[in-house]
Image (tube, rainbow, N blue to C red):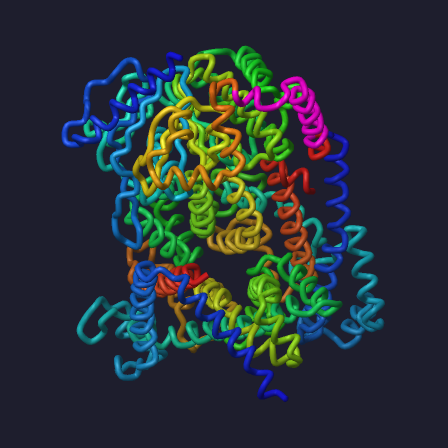
Amino acid sequence: MGDSKWLYILKRLLLLIPTVWGCATLTFFLLKLTPGDPAVQALGPKASKQALAALRESWGLNDPLWQQYLRFLGDLCTGNLGTSYSAKAPVAELIATRLPVTLIIMVLAALFAVLIALPLSIWVATSGSRWVGEFVRILNAVAQGFPTFFLGALLLQFFAIQLGWFPIGSVSGGVDVAALVLPSIAVAVAIAPILIRSLTQSLKDSVSSEYVNFGKAKGLSYAKVLFGYALRNGSMSAVSVLGIQVGFLVGGTLVVENVFAVPGLGQLLMDSVMKRDFPVVQSLTVIFGIIVVLVYLITDLAYGALDPRAAKRG
Amino acid sequence: MPESKQIPVAQASKDYAKIKLTGSKPRKRIHANVEIVIGCVLLGIIALMIIAAPLLTPYDPTHQSLREAMLGFSSDHPLGTDQFGRDIWARLLYGGRIDLFVAVMAVFTPLVIGTILGAIAGYFDGPVPVVIMRLADLVSSFPFYVLVIVLVFVLGNGGTSIFIAISAVSWVPYTRISRGETLVLRDREFIASCKTSGFSDGWVLFRHVIPNIASQGIVYAMSDIVINLGIIVTLSYFGLGIVPPTPDWGQMMNDGQQFLSAGIYSLTVIPTIVIVLISLALSFIGDGLANVLKVRR
Amino acid sequence: MTTAANTANTATATPAATANPETPETRSDPEYALEIVDLCIDVDKHGERVPAVKNLTIRVKAGESHGLVGESGSGKSLTLRAVMGLFAKGAYYRSGYIRICGHEVLGPDTPDYDPSMRGKGVSMVFQEPAVALNPIMKVGWQIVDAVREQEHLSRAEAKARAIELMTSVGITNPEDRFDAYPFELSGGMRQRVMIAAAIACKPKVLLCDEPTTALDVTIQEQILEIFRDIAKSGTALLYVTHDLAVVSQLCETLSVIYHGAIVEEGTLRRVFDDPQDDYTRQLLSSTPYLKGSMKAAKASTKQAAGNGRATAQSETARSQTAQSETAQSEAKGE
């Protein structure tokens, strides 16, 4: 039993390889479309012709496209992501120091989103009142439309600057989780509506389901039926929705990192786009792609753990 | 003889429509329509005001006048002025033009492209559908924001770039939705009868399949407009979007943000309220449409 | 037989009660484990509230099996669910009483069902074990759940009780089956699990909502045997079905429900031999295999089911099907 599970995970991990390859390929050719000469961007417009030519040669920009492509793939496999134009540091190093911050925000945001969505969904699914449903629906629409960066700015203004409950600004030397709480909440508010919708629906289905009826018939208490049966079954949809929406989770993280000046991958990406730092943008795109497919995998595994039927099918 | 062949087709699709109609419960549909009406009225008012901007304000949204900077609400400037003395009411009206236009266009294009691709992927067998769906998988393995930002990096700032970037990324959900619907529809009798009576695949696809599957994509499009509006405003806020001096809501919020600590909220809150109202209106329309469609099924 | 005499009482008592619906007998009769008196339930239909169950009265004694026969939509399931307090959306209690062992769970004073009798007082076996068992929970724990909610047992004790219960409903290898998920079991096995969970707290009243409809005939026979044993142990059984053949094998008394009202009531023998109502006659004639054999074989209803066939033969057949069922579910589990 245990062996087959590990074999399954291994199989899934192997299946990631073509996906990552696809991500890398798409990124490579996409960025080849970028107008402008990378050498000029790296050295600045005032650089001498000789220096530019030398740089182009050393980067292999004069080679045929397919050679550049193969070299890119080879470098990617060996972890050589190139050197940042602006920071003059290896891209891999830049990414490695910032990745934990971004991951912490993503995990915290997912956690907060569940903490926001759960009580609201239970409220809507169990109240049976139409007005409760309408109220939460409008709340959802407001939260969904509210720009994440502005919510972030407001949270920063009130809770960090005025009330001083949370540390402000960038995290230098080590990760200060307290400084990541407000950004995570801003992201959580943005993704909670999607979670609330699906969780409410599956909870409603669960609450009126025959197995909940049978649970009541067996004499189980209301709390037991709600939390042990309805919520447990309903939570599966939340897991899959969180997995599917990981793109938005990353997007939100990217936005708030810039608002809160948190040194994560999102800030790095935005910075590099502004500074037209080609190697960093290219590597980050691939890294974000890998994060997403890994989250898809984790979601699938979690779903399998929650739903024995899915585990059997897999 | 196409004339005689057309009869069973027409009848079949008419029957299909009839089944859909008789399956609906009148009470539920009225409630759903109320939602659509509220949403459309709200959205219509906002859209009309934006279109009729020159009639509603005498000011040029880009005209700076430092002597009139940071004015409060007054009869001259209903919503005051910003730090450059620009009229906020005018900037709000004119700024909505590009934001809403790009948001709607960047939904319409992927809706059309995605629906057609999905219908093709669902209707035919062979390598073409496989390629379409693999490409969809590939695009969806990047976070939406990241890919749009990278595309804006490639294409440069500006409304056209944002439109192309969003369109290039957001066709995927429409393709998935439309493929799923087509797979169901493909086995329905009236499609089979079209196929057997010798109509070309293209004709069946555009005349019968796509009209029947488009509705789900349209419902999704409502929430998609909100997402697009969000990313356009966000990009502008970070200086990657609409290029000044063209007014837009994201820049307005960026301009106003520095005054939050001074306790001046109107510069940032006013565009936010409009965005939230649009989101609310679209959510009403989307939910209403979804209810109508669910009942019809 | 005493049961026949008792049910004759019921038959005579009920018309008296229904004849005067304004003053229903509010005093409970300790003789009955389950009393449904003048129950009226409304449902929403096209936006209007229409009566679906009309002045329904059924009384069942401890150890007695009562059949409630009717077609789908006749209100029989609605009645059962009312006893259980499981009103579906769009169904409303209007008037009448439901008492479990003399305790009023639904009535004018308790219009919001009192759930305190669920489990120990009344429990229910549903029609579709595939949907009534929690699909993501091991079946053993679904029985343990019920045991532990009412009696404060340790996990190990509760598990032992559950395995005992599983054995009592004819589940072979209960220790192995304990950790199975519902989808890994065959339909018959699932139904046994549900029965085990339903009787876990030894309810005084067991409601059965067509529990054998989804099963094939041989397994149906085994399940009915389990219900006979449950009734023998002193539980009052209210068995809802559209199948008169099943009623003839299990119940001593029956009511026929049509459009939400009881049209015929009495002992099995009386109703089968001498139906008073046209609808009952139609029902009987539409169950062809009952017609000839019943009149002869129904001398003793209890024995009829067992004696109808060669006992030894059916025993072997039963163990064979049990085995094949085991193999089937094991194959599914693989």
Judged left or right of residue C33, residue A58 is: right
C134 or C287: nearer the eye?
C287
In this view of the protein, can residue A219 be seen by the observer?
Answer: no
Q: Can you say which quadrant of the picture contains the N terminus of chain A? A: top right
Which residues, given as a range, are shown in magenta? C304-329
Residue closest to the eye, B80 or B22:
B22
Q: Is residue C229 left or right of residue B187?
A: left
Q: Quadrant of residue C207?
A: top left
Residue C307 inside the magenta-drawn segment: yes
Q: Is residue B251 visible?
A: yes
Q: Position of residue B216 (x, y in %)?
A: 49, 64
Could you tell me residue B135's position as x and y percent? 68, 64
Left or right: residue B148 versus residue A312 is left
Q: Is residue B252 magenta?
A: no
View extreme (left): residue:
C22
Report which quarter residue B174 is drawn in: bottom right
Residue B189 in the image: state x and y as whole percent.
58, 68
For residue A24, which quarter of the picture? bottom right
Residue at point 33%, 54% (across, down)? A138
Compared with A197, A43 (above or below) is: below
Return the residue nearer the eye: C180 or A150.
C180
Residue C276: percent from left, percent from top:
33, 34
Label count reads 0
Q: Is residue B287 above or below residue B44?
A: above
Give C228 or C83, whichever is nearer the viewer.
C228
**What residue is drawn where x is 50% and y is 53%?**
A252
On the picture, is C223 further left or further right than C327?
A: left
- What is the chief secondary structure element of the magenta stretch? helix
On-image quarter of the C terminus of chain A:
top right
